[in-house]
Amino acid sequence: MKFVDEAHIEVVAGNGGNGTVSFRREKFIPRGGPDGGDGGRGGSIWAVADRNINTLVDYRYARRHEARNGEHGRGSDQYGAAADDIWLRVPVGTVIHDQDSGELVTDLAADGDTALLARGGNGGLGNIHFKSSVNRAPRQSTPGREGEQRRLRMELRVLADVGLLGMPNAGKSTLISAISNARPKIADYPFTTLYPNLGVVRVGPEKSFVVADIPGLIEGASEGAGLGHQFLRHLQRTGLLLHLVDLSPVDPDADPARDARAILRELRVYDTTLYEKPRWLVLNKVDMIPEDEREARIEAFIKCFRGRGRSAIPVDRSRVFVISALTREGCQSLCWAIQEHLEAVRPQQDRERDVRFDDAPPPAPPKPPQPRPGRSRSQR
């Protein structure tokens, strides 16, 4: 199945049915009074997160979703039937924005989350609602209201604990295949990864985390070079970024420190919040460096990567890991360090979430309105 993480759709809710003007006309009942029923409610359009779906490919070509209109009211106190609602199933982690205004409509971050995209119009009132002691034969009724119509932009942001960041051919796909059961495409040319890959890393019987691998970044991505910033949205939900660096590039003119700083510049241009996430340096492909030269090569890289002056980048040596994804050297210690970091961060996030809920509990997801049953004369 083709991976699609962005789609543009148009949703059109149904119009409400019109109320009717009618009078009871039966034998031996010359003045039966008004009996015009109300119109039915138009169908609404909802979105629901489904964990069994992992792509937005269903909405790449089906771009218009239109609900039916409610039925008009009829005589004999007959109410128009309400139209059925339309439910759009989307992957968990889908973010929906209004394409015209740019405002956030909903963020479906958990399985089963629902959101109203377009509300159907209410049905009009029949003339039975306008009768009174001074107006016994009302000829007034109201038309049904129009349903909402919107153009929406849907974006899928994968749910992962750790995100891999780096230049093409830095070894991200090799690393995720070495520490998890994911089997992404691996080759000796750049941009082998064309869409995000997820892998579950198990470090114990009940200890695991999810890693996301995205296509590599190059300098000038903000201007559209390479694949640009197309897939960086998938790192926005991660709690930790692993910045992979190739210490032994094939190109002799390549400078790993310069390329690593270029990645950080592109990250800051895209989103400062993403740039400020916890980020660890992972120096890969040390198996291609002689053992007696490794320490000097690592120190030279860190010194050049850190820089000087106002543009200096702080580097925590305790968060610098030296690995070989091919031979799996250092991968086990890296996984344990990630697990310890996530276990230390998760309780704090839970406490912050509990405090936020106590201060201002978020509103519950709206429930879809139930269709109003018709009424016969015997039910009056």
Image (cartoon, rainbow, N blue to C red):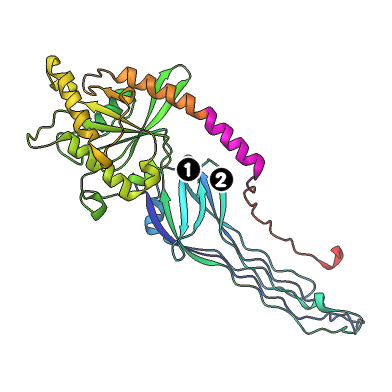
Neighbor class of circle 1 (other Cα within 10 Å; few <14, some 14-19, many 20+) is: many
As drawn, is 70 to the left or to the right of 57?
Answer: right
* Residue at point 21%, 19% (across, down): 327
As drawn, is 300 to the left or to the right of 116?
Answer: left
Q: Quadrant of the C terminus?
A: bottom right
Provide the secondary structure element on which disc 2 rests.
Answer: loop
Pointer 2 residue: 113
As drawn, is 165 to the left or to the right of 130?
Answer: left
Q: CA distance from mark 2 to mark 1?
A: 8 Å
* Magenta extent: 347-362
Q: Is residue 64 above or below residue 144?
A: above
Q: Give the amino acid type for the residue marked by disc 1 in the picture.
A: Val
Q: Observer-nearest residue: 261 or 193?
A: 261
Query: Is residue 357 shown in magenta?
Result: yes
Pointers 2 and 1 in contact (C-beta within 8 Å)? yes
Provide the secondary structure element on which disc 1 rests.
Answer: loop
Q: Quadrant of the N terminus?
A: top left
* Residue at point 58%, 68% (across, down): 147
Neighbor class of circle 2 (other Cα within 10 Å; few <14, some 14-19, many 20+) is: some
Which residue is most to the left?
252
As drawn, is 366 to the left or to the right of 64?
Answer: right
Is residue 216 visible from the viewing direction of this image?
A: no
* Residue at point 76%, 73% (across, down): 37
Where residue 275 appears, as percent x and y from the top left, is 35, 42
Pointer 1 residue: 92
Q: Observer-nearest residue: 176 or 111?
A: 176
The circle drawn on residue 48 is none
Where residue 196 appears, as percent x and y from the top left, is 32, 40
Where residue 85 appears, as percent x and y from the top left, is 59, 58
* Residue at point 72%, 61% (across, down): 372
Q: Give the amino acid type for the residue marked by disc 2 in the picture.
A: Asp
